[in-house]
Amino acid sequence: MMTGIRHNLLKCGFVFFIVVVQYAHGQVSYSVQEELKRGSVIGNIAKDLGLEVERLSARKARVFMQGNERQYCEINLQNGDLLVAERIDREEHCGEKPSCVLKFDLLLESPLELHRLSLQVQDINDNAPVFPKNTVKLEIRESADRGAKYRLNAAHDADIGKNSVESYILEQNPHFVFGIQTTSAGRKYGELVLKQELDREDQQEMKLLLTAVDGGSPQRSGTVIIHVIVLDANDNAPVFTEAVYTATIPENSPMNTKIMTVSASDIDEGVNGEVTYEFSRLSDKSRKIFSLDEKTGEISVTGDIDYEEGHKYEVFVEAKDGYGLSSEAKVIIDITDVNDNAPVIYINSLSNPIPENVPPDTEVGIINVQDKDSENNGQLHCSIQQNVPFKLIPSIKNYYSLVTTGQLDRELVSDYNITISATDEGSPPLSSSKTVQLSVADINDNPPVFEEQSYSAYVTENNKPGSTLCSVTARDPDWRQNGTVIYSLLPGEVNGAPVSSYVSVNGDTGVIHAVRSFDYEQLMNFKVQLMARDNGSPPLSSNVTVSVFISDVNDNSPQILYPALEGNSFMTELIPKAAHGGSLVSKVIAVDADAGQNAWLSYHIVTSSDPGLFSIDVHSGEIRTQRDISESDSMKQNLIVAVKDNGQPSLSATCSMYLIISDNLAEVTELKDISSDEKNSKLTSYLIIALVSVSTFFLTFIIIIMGVRFCRRRKPRLLFDGAVAIPSAYLPPNYADVDGTGTLRSTYNYDAYLTTGSRTSDFKFVTSYNDNTLPADQTLRKSPSDFAEVFGDCDTSPEV
Ligand SMILES: *[C@@H]1O[C@H](CO)[C@@H](O)[C@H](O)[C@H]1NC(C)=O
Ligand SMILES: *[C@@H]1O[C@H](CO)[C@@H](O)[C@H](O)[C@H]1NC(C)=O
Ligand SMILES: *[C@@H]1O[C@H](CO)[C@@H](O)[C@H](O)[C@H]1NC(C)=O
């Protein structure tokens, strides 16, 4: 190339040199451009030194360079020109020296003459800048900081001054700039300066072209390729695929259930990119139930997961690369509820026992139900069984009131077992139940109740005082003293005497005792009011009537009303001689104070002076002739009649009857005989008179009574056919009904027969005593002695 340039210069004919002749210190200096072609004229010595040209060859003028074999110059001896004898390379001789001077000696002989010549070699831009290598390989760690400097050998240009390297041009790039530095020794070097960090992961290598240009004209340049290899640095932390991971698992998930996998990647290489996982922040609780696979990032269950203990876990997972760069991600694990908790029932309060008289809708207890589960799994329904008079009323959340729905009755149900069940809405639902025992407390709400509406006691008369009549029982279903029954007699009167003088009652047992001995003939029955009272406060009571019926004992003998008593009177019946068989002659009238069978009388002839002549009707006591009377029959006839009752044993009475067969009262004189016979004869006439008057009195009395009665009541008429009614005054007291109800039992109905003693007339009066004919207020109370007064003492003797 240099030669090329040189050629061009010559072709143009442009002589490119300057010859400067200097005589400083006897020296002549020339200046010449390097790389001139051989034969180029540097200067003319002869002229410059004043030498004769013709003598040059004679004096053998010649130049030689001190200390150098190479002879760059020669002298043209014909004209004295100094010529370039050989190409002069300034760089070869002077290198980088800024001035390059070659020294020559000019030698002349005859006479020997020495001149010093110096040749200043002028540089031309004949060299391009050159880098030591075509390619520079630079390995730079990506972690290098901004401003880091990398030394490069500078380009070298053999030319000097302007012609040497003037500037560098670095290919446009984002990372580096190029600068030139000079060492303290003055050496120049290049510096690649990092102006922006490298990223291997972004660009692993780059090739930059660096061009060095010199300042010559024409300009020359040299290039080098800087091959930058970016070395990896652990500059990348692992990066999770998500900042926050979420997962949902049901509670009670079994061990080793996989929950999720976290994943982080590290774009670094090798160890720098090996990622391991671990929990970074973890509560003690979480530590027990979650595990993380170090290599795979899989999170799984290692403990019991209970929604009720925690339903959201936040754990932090750290991913680390081989040199410890790490990053963190959050993992949110939501636990979903499973219906694994049965409801629990709590009895918050309970009134026990509850009085049986509480009104309906009374609150007796408060119940609370709880379920640890959430949402539907914890939604509860509470109920109790149907067949109890209680219900649950929902109150504030999960609280219930247990209230009564109806009236309670301890006497019907005294204890309730109330089963409360609670069920949640889970699927499947869970339920539980609890039984509450509730007692009903007693209230004295039941009066004692007698087992029967009324009681009847039957006692035979002549009982022993203190004997038991009957017992009453009243029941009271209440509890303890509220149900304890005490019996007592209500005050009252029987026959004008306090009832307590008749009976007494055992307060505890209800047994009724007779206080005295009863007499049927005096008192057939009576009523007593009893009260049964409980011991409650206030007490309740009820009353009952006890009717005491006294039954008859055959303790009264028949009493013969007619004929009058033997010994005291003298009774005679007249029988016409013409009387035919079957004629009624007389009649025995008797009564018995007893009742029923005991008063059922029968008549018998015990002895007769003429057996076969008379007969007596066993029931009516009528005495009739059995045959016609004949002349041969004795005028005086005697009969002894016995009257027996039907009691067991039966009692009887006897009486004598005197009969006279005569048509003629005159013959009655003979009665004196009879009377004298009978010791009572003198009384006969009085007796007859008395009888007649008594009969008349009876008759009148009855007529008056009946008349009064008939007029007042217009009630049943008495068939009064010459008959005589026995006034009630003559009847024993038991003929009247003492209970005042007016009911006379049929057994008390009697037929009474009475004759007046007339021989011819039959007096017959039949009546049935009933309430209408004989009001209770007309009851005559007579003691047996009263009868004795009236009837005298009839001969009574029990018939064996
Ligand atoms: C209630 O339960 C108790 C105890 O189990 C039992 O003794 C009692 O008889 C029960 N009562 C009723 C009314 O069922
Ligand atoms: C009896 O009833 C009363 C209320 O009438 C009540 O206060 C009392 O407790 C009851 N007695 C018993 C033993 O139950
Ligand atoms: C029972 O009789 C007594 C006295 O006559 C009376 O005071 C009381 O009220 C009666 N009791 C009943 C339940 O009738």
Image (spheres, rainbow, N blue to C red):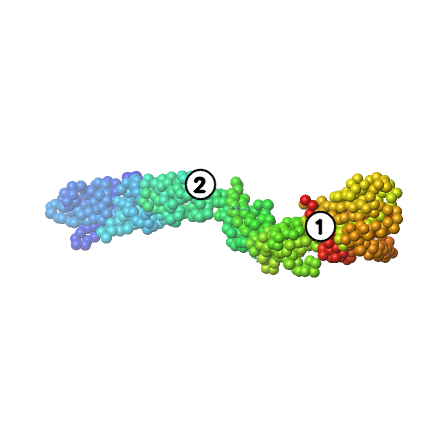
Mark 1–mark 2 distance (CA, rounded to whole Å): 118 Å
Label annotation for residue 785: none
Viewer-closest of 688 and 246: 688
Which circle, 1 or 2, is nearer the viewer?
A: 1
Viewer-closest of 99 and 712: 712
Viewer-closest of 421 and 763: 763
| Crowd band around label 2 with a 10 angstrom C-alpha radius: few (<14), some (14–19), many (20+) | some
Q: Position of residue 332 (x, y in %)?
A: 44, 46
Is 292 positioned to the left or the right of 378 in the image? left
- Can residue 452 be seen in this snapshot? yes
Q: Regarding mark 2 in the picture, which secondary structure is present there?
A: loop
Is 478 positioned to the left or the right of 783 in the image? left
- Mark 1 highlights which residue? 796
Q: Position of residue 370 (x, y in %)?
A: 51, 49
At x 23%, y 53%, the residue is 184
Q: Which amino acid type corresponds to the residue marked 2 in the rendered image?
A: Ser
At x 39%, y 49%, the residue is 283
| Crowd band around label 1 with a 10 angstrom C-alpha radius: few (<14), some (14–19), many (20+) | some
Say whether mark 1 is within 8 Å of ligand 3. no
At x 80%, y 53%, the residue is 681
Q: Which amino acid type corresponds to the residue marked 1 in the rendered image?
A: Thr
Outermost left residue:
111
